[in-house]
Amino acid sequence: MNEEKSKDAKYVKMTETPVSRLIISLGIPTTISMLITNIYNMADSYFVSQVSLSAGGATSIVFGIMSILQAFGFMFGHGAGSNISRMLGSRQIDRASKYASTGFFSALICGFLIMSVGLIFLEPLMRLLGSTETILPYAIDYGMWILIAAPAMTASCVLNNILRYEGMATLAMIGLTTGGILNMALDPLFIFTFDMGIAGAGLATALSQYISFCILLSMFLMKKTQSRLSARLAAGEPRILGDIIITGLPSFARQGLNSVSTMVLNAQAKVFGDAAIAAMGYVGRTSSLIFSVGLGIGQGFQPVSGFNYGAKKYSRVKKGTLFTLGFGAAFIGVISAVCFIFAPDIISLFRTEKEVIEIGSEALRIMCVFLLFLPISVVGTMLFQSIGKSISALILSCLQSGAVFIPLCLILPSFLGVLGIEMAQPVAYFVSALVSLPMTLRFLKSLPKDE
């Protein structure tokens, strides 16, 4: 009886709480989680950069592996979560558990496969990701531990997203932030106190990822969620795996193209030396931190959108979209302005070489201007993905992540030198916004009245 009351209370919360308040209440824990995650990525870069310039460049190389792991993790996580929110919105709780179980075990198996293949071909993989001869030894030491953490990283993405889509972003935040804070504490201990160098940073990341995974899993074992995890449920209907993959494909495309984009960026920057690779890596970390604010609020919007679309409360979907777009643009605008002003100081936190600071500050300032267009494509992508319109979400994800950036990054340096590398991603954000805005507005206009 108590369980039924709890389910009814969650339904009322998701369908009757004022939209703006609900999105913020779900978005703030997610934003905190993403900020902590990005801060500990920056902390990794900071502590490793104290070892040497080449070691700092290695974090940019290995970031490509993390993007691959996130591609699969988010594909299964967003694919399962989107379906779960719509199932819960239409009160199909048993079916929601099938999506949760299938997504979780698929991501876990995928993580083990990537770990096994990656460790076997570790050196060729690091070269493929753009490593120079001087960076290679550091990339191998760091990348080995990231691959060992692969199963935890992919499966945690699913657990985190299920909690978010069920409207329990605070529980997801606890798991992610605990791992992030632990990573920041262990970095200096392993790197400097235990004199492990860059391998210490990798070990700190691997340990924190597995601890975060255990905390997230405990939420399900203690039955704090409506959906349940079971190997039996995961093996029940192959069609469910297809639904998850199709719905999660935009996330896979976004993260997968990010990985390819990182490889292309590093290969193009390699022409200008280790300083360019390191500088662009630091800019990427900083812009990801800014991006996480808009993405965090957007991920607070996703469960609201999916749940209410499933409940046929279309006016709340429309209100939520417009609110998230305005709020995200204002928030990112303020942070981007601060980073634009203090760009040289931010880059000098990592390295003090003149060339690194010059390349990094110019690239960061350009990025800050164009980040103002990012919320348009992010909100559009998340709207379409949360309600199951995968093709529209896939198109916007590809434009935002690599379909425009990769050709620009290959072409522009021939004419503009290192400035071409700095301009490629910002211009890609602008183009994706131009495509996303009319698609989103047209869809909102087509929504029927509430049933």
Image (cartoon, rainbow, N blue to C red):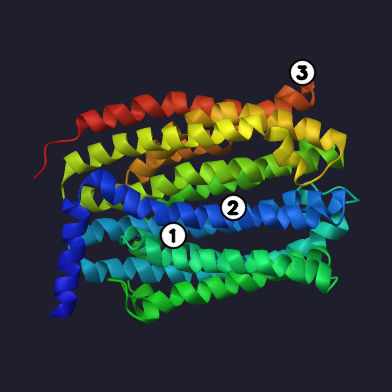
Badge 1 is on which residue?
77
Secondary structure under the numbered disc 2 in the rendered image: helix
Secondary structure under the numbered disc 1 in the rendered image: helix
Residue that extends furthest to the top in the rendered view of this protein: 415
Location of residue 442 with respect to 303 vertically, above or below:
above
Badge 3 is on which residue?
415
> Count of labels shown?
3
Q: CA distance from mark 2 to mark 3?
A: 33 Å
Which residue appears at 18% of the width and 41% of the height? 314
In the image, residue 205 lies at what x, y percent? Answer: 66, 66
- Amino acid type at circle 1 is Gly
Secondary structure under the numbered disc 3 in the rendered image: helix
Which residue appears at 46% of the width and 67% of the height? 174
- Amino acid type at circle 2 is Asn
In the image, residue 218 lies at what x, y percent? Answer: 43, 78
Q: Earlier in the sequence, mark 1 or mark 2?
A: 2
Location of residue 279 with respect to 184 vertically, above or below:
above
**Cβ–Cβ under 8 Å for marks 2 and 3:** no
Q: CA distance from mark 1 to mark 2?
A: 19 Å
Residue 125: tell me if it is visible. no
Which label sits on residue 91?
none
Badge 2 is on which residue?
38
In the picture, measured across the screen, residue 75 lies left or right of residue 273, that is left
Residue 67: tell me if it is visible. yes
